[in-house]
Amino acid sequence: MKIAFFDAKPYDIPAFEKYGGDYGISFKFFEAKLNSDTAKLAKGYDGVCAFVNDTVNAEVIDKLYDMGVNVLALRCAGFNNVDMKHAHGRLHVLRVPAYSPYAVAEHTMALLLTSIRRIHKAYIRSRDFNFSLSGLTGFDLYGKTVGVIGTGRIGRVFIDICRGFGMKVLAYDKFPAEGLDNGDTVRYTELDELFAKSDIISLHCPLTEDTYHIIDENALEKCKKGIVILNTSRGALVDAEALLAGIKSRKVGAACLDVYEEESDLFFEDNSGHILEDDTLARLISMPNVIVTSHQAFLTEEALENIAETTVKNLADFFEKGQCSNELCFRTGETVDCKNGKCF
Ligand code: NAI
């Protein structure tokens, strides 16, 4: 089977070639992102493989369908870039539901520690033999309250890490996990209480209609002065303009962003020789208390191996058995994990 692999990066290729070889699946690696202009590259292939910033809207889905391509293997967990409603009946959508929650949760803590202990500042100073400590005062995490929105795989690992630091956790989830709330160091609560009592807020929920701009002007107003916002989930969970305003007014003490609402044309690429058109991102990056990484939380050796192995197995199952346990389906009007794969 031949798969058109979009938005290929050098770090993707070795593991996909290895597992593809094991399962009889060959990949054609295209550097281009999947969108309505590039969809035609998939002509003659048995399926497509896409990542977080590929665009799989109705137009792309129709083009793939017209070319006889009926399977999309997402090499990620999130699927907010796929029009799942339109895909139903036209495109089987497979995903990698989990590949290393540790990778993302650990990166989140790395960002938090870097930010509040000013490691990013200290690193640059000491390279210039500037050993002054002025302006580098941080604060202890021990005893602080972290609000965790989304207590799925990544959120729960992040909670464990925070508990190791002696932090208190206020959690919010549309579907709370059983056995997590111990009535003491981890407690489920409503969003308003989480906003009001947290010193740090970390986002680990998917991007949906419910969670779009879950951190907006209103939410920030309810937060403590000096709130630290961590977003390693999806950019549009945070209203970037409201965040910038919060930073300017000193309400927000720090922000660590691995994702950004308008990241798709920027992140994963070297834009160092270009003029950045996005003034909001440029202003955020210019702030001393903002750290931006370019959607790299997933990027560990373990995660890359798991992503490649699961994606290839998903495709192999789909082609051999006509169904895949990691298929997503919109049959019920909401995207759900569907083990069936036979509904169209
Ligand atoms: P998961 O599906 O295990 O957990 C998501 C949790 O969010 C679930 O407990 C769910 O009930 C909850 N949730 C759903 N709707 C909600 C709502 N309206 N309000 C509050 N909670 C809600 O997903 P996982 O693996 O923990 O991933 C979380 C997110 O992390 C993904 O959706 C993805 O956007 C992001 N991610 C980011 C990566 C990166 O490299 N920066 C890599 C992988 C995932």
Image (cartoon, rainbow, N blue to C red):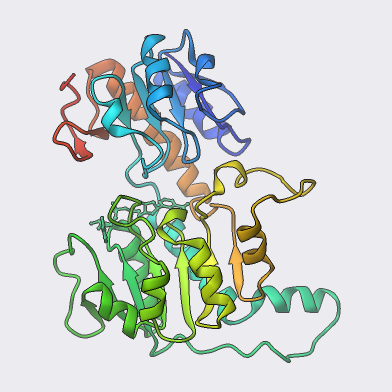
- Name the residue located 38 percent from the left edge and 18 percent from the top edge: 62
Q: Residue 165, relative to residue 64: is it above or below?
A: below
- Where residue 181 appears, as percent x and y from the top left, is 18, 75
- Where residue 228 appears, as percent x and y from the top left, is 48, 77
Residue 128, by quadrant, is: bottom right
- Name the residue located 46 percent from the left edge and 59 percent from the top edge: 232
Where, quadrant-wise, is the N terminus in this rendering? top left
Q: Residue 326, relative to residue 208: is it above or below?
A: above
Q: Is residue 96 left or right of residue 48?
A: left
Q: Residue 21, relative to residue 168: is it above or below?
A: above
Q: Nearer the viewer, residue 126 or 196?
A: 196
- Where residue 272 appears, as percent x and y from the top left, is 76, 49
Q: Residue 128, relative to residue 135: is it above or below?
A: above
Q: Is residue 241 left or right of residue 76?
A: right
- Name the residue located 45 percent from the left edge and 27 percent from the top edge: 49
Q: Residue furthest right?
A: 129
Residue 102 in view, yes or no:
yes
Q: Nearer the viewer, residue 148 or 235?
A: 235
Residue 143, by quadrant, is: bottom left
Q: Nearer the viewer, residue 13 or 54?
A: 54
- Name the residue located 83 percent from the left edge and 83 percent from the top edge: 130
